[in-house]
Amino acid sequence: MRLADTNVLLGFVMPSGERQTVALDTLVSGVESADERLVVTEVVLAEAVWVLRSFYGWERGAIASALIELLSTPSLVAWDPAVAGAALGLMASDPRLDIADCLLAARARVDGDEVVTFDERLRRTLEG
């Protein structure tokens, strides 16, 4: 298993030049020829969302769409695809929640767990 860090994930979303594009192509070729996939953890996903929002000013819906599309490619997979997909979908549909809350709500829904929180927005989302 190969774990992708945030810079690799962001490189796929918005390559910073020819050199990085070549490096990403080489990485993907190596992963695919070894019949592997790059795994994106929830921490990396959260950091990528934060960077795209904070530094590049991307809208939540655009971030969710780009990451959902990227995680459906043959070379990348989320650590837990059900949680990542649910979290990104929630992030796109509910502007009140940050990515950490979306990941927590998605994890609770997928696993059937209870979330303990003092956050009213998150509690309403979990109850709704």
Image (tube, grey):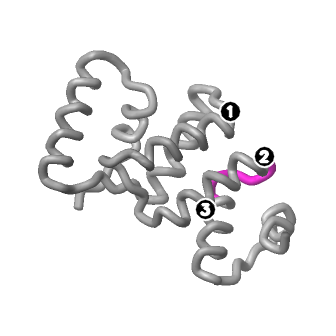
In the image, is residue 117 above or below residue 46? below
N-terminal-most mark, 2 or 1? 1
Corner quadrant of residue 101: bottom right
Q: Is residue 62 left or right of residue 13?
A: right
Between the C-alphas of marks 2 and 1, the distance is 10 Å
As drawn, 43 above or below 65: below
Q: Earlier in the sequence, mark 3 or mark 1?
A: 1
Left-right relation of 48 to 117: left
Toward the top, the furthest residue is: 18
Mark number displayed over residue 110? none
* Label disc, if present, on residue 103 of the rendered structure: 3
Q: Position of residue 47 (x, y in %)?
A: 51, 47
Magenta-highlighted residues:
95-100
Taking the image as shown, residue 120 lies to the left or right of residue 12, namely right
Residues at marks 3 and 2 touching, judged by CB atoms closer than 8 Å: no
Q: Residue at x 68, y 68 (%)?
A: 105
Residue at image point 75% right, 53% down: 97
Callout 2: SS:
loop
* Residue labelled with disc 2: 95
Q: Earlier in the sequence, mark 3 or mark 2?
A: 2
Question: Residue 59's mark?
Answer: 1
Task: Check the image and name the residue furthest to the bottom.
Answer: 113
Residue 19: x, y in percent?
A: 23, 19
Q: Residue at x 78, y 51 (%)?
A: 94
The residues tagged by marks 3 and 2 sit, at their Cα atoms, a distance apart of: 14 Å
Amino acid type for the residue under numbered disc 1 = Glu
Q: Name the residue type under label 2.
A: Pro
Question: Is residue 21 rendered magenta in the image?
Answer: no
- Residue 56's place in the image compared with 32, above or below, is above
Magenta span dominant secondary structure: loop
